[in-house]
Image (tube, helix red, strand yellow):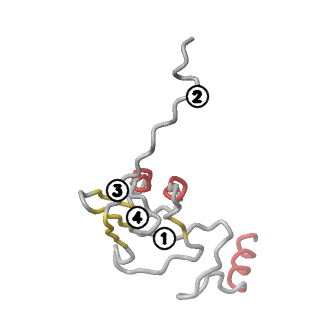
Amino acid sequence: MNILNLLMENLLGGPVTVRFPDRPPTSAGYRGLVEYDQKLCEACGLCAFVCTSAAIISKRRRDAYDWSYDPGQCTFCARCIEVCEPHALTMQAACPPVYAVSGELKHSYSMPRKAPVKKSPPAPPANAGAPR
């Protein structure tokens, strides 16, 4: 008799899903699409290096830096966000848009390559020249 009760509850309970194009609300810890800020990027390529799903691809050329992101391949693990020191990458809190064709949401950027910042050598200690 338990199966009959279960069937009746399901039939009389109504639908549990949300009709398209409405979406269920996202939870507080939801991780969405990666957003890229070209102005903050240092073109180090660490984001592409740690991306396990190859959703982020970076390519250094002599005079430019190419960066692309394909949300269709992304697993939303946020590893790229964690390694980005200049905080050029962030994640949206909203659900990604619905897409029908693979690669439809892909974003590509190309920017001129920045000159590397040269760090000055550390200053010698004050008593470095004194005999022992």
Q: Is residue 54 left or right of residue 131?
A: left
Q: Residue 48 at x, y = what percent?
A: 40, 55
Q: Is residue 117 left or right of residue 21?
A: left
Which dot, 3 or 2, sits closer to the camera? 2
Measure how far apart labels 1 and 4 are at the Cα level.
Answer: 15 Å
Looking at the image, residue 123 lies above or below residue 58: above
Give the structural element (helix, strand or loop) at label 3.
Answer: loop
Say few, some or many: other residues with alpha carbon within 10 Å of mark 4 (under 14 / 14 to 19 / 20 or more).
some
Identify the amino acid type marked 2.
Answer: Ala
Measure how far apart labels 4 and 2 are at the Cα level.
Answer: 55 Å
Identify the amino acid type marked 1.
Answer: Glu
At horizontal 66% and vertical 65% (from top left) the residue drawn is: 29
Check if mark 3's residue and mark 2's residue have beta carbons within 8 Å.
no
Q: Residue 126 shows which numbered tag? A: 2
- Name the residue at the top extreme: 132
Looking at the image, residue 104 lies above or below residue 51: below
In depth, the one of 63 and 59 nearer the eye is 63
The quadrant the C terminus occupies is top right
Say which label, 3 or 4, has the lower sequence index.
4
Q: Which residue is mark 3?
A: 115
Q: Which residue is mark 4?
A: 73
Give the structural element (helix, strand or loop) at label 4.
Answer: loop
